[in-house]
Amino acid sequence: MLKKRLEELIPKWREEISSINKEHGNHVISEVTIGQAYGGMRGVKGMICDTSDVPPDKGLIIRGIPVAKLADRLPEEVLYLLLTGELPDEKALHSLQKELQARSKVPAYVWKVLESMPKDSHPMVMFDTAILVMEKESLFRQHYDEGMKKSDYWIWALEDTLNLVAKLPAIGAAVYRMRFKKGPRIPSKKNLDWASNYAHMLGFKDKTGEFANLMKLYMVLHSDHEGGNVSAHTCHCVGSALSDPYYAVSAGLNGLAGPLHGLANQECLNWLLMVIEKFKGVPSDEDLRKFSWDTLNSGKVIPGYGHAVLRITDPRFDAFRAFGRRVMPEDPVFQLMDKVFEIVPKVLLEQGKAKDPWPNVDAASGSLLYHFGMKEFSYYTVLFSISRAMGMCSQLVVNRAVGTPIERPKSVTTAWIKSQIAKATPAQMA
Ligand code: NMX
Ligand code: MLT
C-alpha cells in the first residue's frame, strides 16, 4: 500500500518541483557571508528536505506536524508520514507492519561478522559494520547495474529502505547482547510492533510495559531532523552519487557517531554520572553551578546543551522529560537531569558563548534509559541510529523520486577570500 500511495504522489511532486524550478529557478533564497563559509555553513539555505523542518523557534516539525503531536504514535506511522507526507490509516499501517515483519530476518553472515570483531569494538562500529556488510543485498545497486531507468530509482531505494529498516531492531539488539555479554540473541515475536519487538529482543524485564513505551517514544523523537544535520546531510551527499542506501546510511551513521552529534547521547549520561560520583548523589544548586563552570573552564562542552539551529528548549527534550516525570519522578539520575536543566542554561548564558543555551534531545534520554537498567552508555547512539535511519532513508527515497542531482557545492580558497576582501569597498565589508 505504501508503494502504491507513493506511485500516486510522486508524479505530483515531480511536476511541482519542475515547475518551481522552471518559473522561479533564479529567485535568490540565501546569501553566504565569509563567516558562514568558515563557520560550518550555519544558516545557509542551500538544500531541500521535504521530510521535516526545524524552525529555530519551534523545533522539529515532521511533514507539517510538530513532533510533540506525534509522541503517542508508532514509529511505523512516522516512517509512513516521512515517506508520503500523510499519516497512515489503520489498513496502511497494518500493511506496512506486515511488510517490515516479512523483511526482518537478518542474513546469518551478519552475525558471523559481528562475532569476529574485536570484543572492545564500539557498539556504533558494530552496528554500522552490520549495515555496510549487508550492501551485497542492495536491490538498488543490482537494478542500477542492470540499467534501470532514472524514474525507477525510488522504487529500489524504497525496497532497500524497507529491507534495512526492518532488520535494524534485531541487529541493534544483537549488538547490545553480544557486546555487553547479555547472553544469546532473543528471537523476535510476530505479534509485536517494530519498537516493542526491539525492546523485547534487548531482553529487559518490562512488567509495566514502560520500557517498550520508551523505545516507541525514542524511535519517534529521533527519526528525522531536517536535512542539514551531519548524519542526514552525509547520507544525502553519499546517496546523491547514487551509492545505494546501505552505503549512504552507513556513511551517515559514521557522522552520528561524533561527540558533537549523536554521541552526545552517551556523553550526557557520562557527565551526569560524574556529577553523582563527585557529590555522592544529587548536588546542591551551587555545587552543580561550579561543576558546570569547571567543565567549561577545562575547555569542554556541556553535552546535551546547545544546538546549531534551535534557539529554544528542544521539544524532543520536553517529551522525554514528560515521560520521566510520569514514570520515574523519584529516580536520582532523572532528578539530576531535571536540576541540570535549571542550572546549565543560566551558566551558558553567563558564559555568553553558546548561541543556544537550552537542552537538545540528548540531554534527557540517557537518564531514562539508565532507569530501566540500560547502563552501558556507549550503546546509546545505536538507539539514535536505529531511529534516524528512518529519516535518512526517507530522504533518500524522496530524493531519488524527484531526481535530485549529485551534490557538489563550490569550495573556495582563503586566497580567493582575501582577493574578494581586497576588491570590496569599505561599505561592502561592513
Ligand atoms: N557547552 C559549552 N560550549 C558550548 C556549548 C555547550 N553545550 N554549545 C556551544 N558552545 C560553544 C561552542 O563550542 C562555540 O565555542 P567556540 O567559539 O569556542 O568554538 C560557541 O559556544 C558557539 O557555538 P554555537 O554557534 O552556539 O554552536 P554550534 O552551532 O557551533 O554547535 C553544537 C552546536 C550542538 C555542536 C554545540 O552546541 C555543542 O557542542 N553542544 C554540546 C554537544 C551536544 O549536545 N551535541 C548534540 C547535538 C544534538 N544531536 O542530537 O546531535
Ligand atoms: C539532530 O537530531 O540531528 C540534532 O539535533 C542535530 C542537528 O539537527 O543538527
Image (cartoon, rainbow, N blue to C red):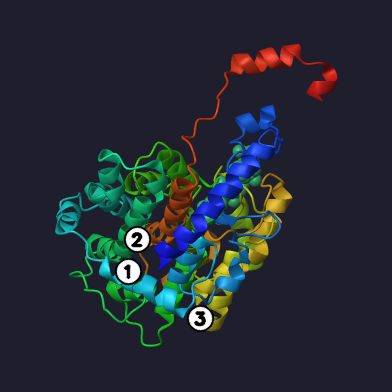
Pointer 2 residue: 162
Q: Label 1 is placed on what type of residue?
A: Glu
Q: Label 3 is placed on what type of residue?
A: Met
Q: Can residue 223 be seen in this view?
A: no
- x, y percentage for residue 173? 29, 66
Distance, label 1 to label 3, CA atoms, is 35 Å
Please tell me the numbered disc located at residue 99: 1
The secondary element bearing badge 1 is classed as helix
Q: Can residue 327 be seen in this view?
A: yes
**Ligand 2 neighbours mark 1 (CB distance < 8 Å):** no
The secondary element bearing badge 3 is classed as loop
- Quarter where residue 225 is shown: bottom right
Q: Residues within 10 Å of mark 2 (few under 14, many from 20)?
A: many
- x, y percentage for residue 270? 45, 59
Residue in view at x 54 percent, y 73 percent: 71
Camera-side residue: 329 or 276?
A: 329
Distance, label 2 to label 1, CA atoms, is 8 Å
Answer yes or no: do the residues labelled 3 and 2 have beta carbons within 8 Å?
Answer: no
Pointer 3 residue: 328
Residue in view at x 68 percent, y 27 percent: 34
Q: Quadrant of the N terminus?
A: bottom left
Give the mark, 2 or 1, whose residue is nearer the N terminus.
1
Answer yes or no: do the residues labelled 1 and 3 have beta carbons within 8 Å?
Answer: no
Residue 366, placed above or below residue 307: below
**Left or right: 170 as drawn, with respect to 361:** left
- x, y percentage for residue 391? 47, 56
**Ligand 1 neighbours mark 3 (CB distance < 8 Å):** no
Q: How crowded is mark 1: few (under 14 residues within 10 Å), some or many (20 or more)?
A: some
**Left or right: 275 as drawn, with respect to 172:** right
- Quarter where residue 194 is shown: bottom left
Residue 130, placed above or below residue 145: below
Q: Residue furthest bottom?
A: 207
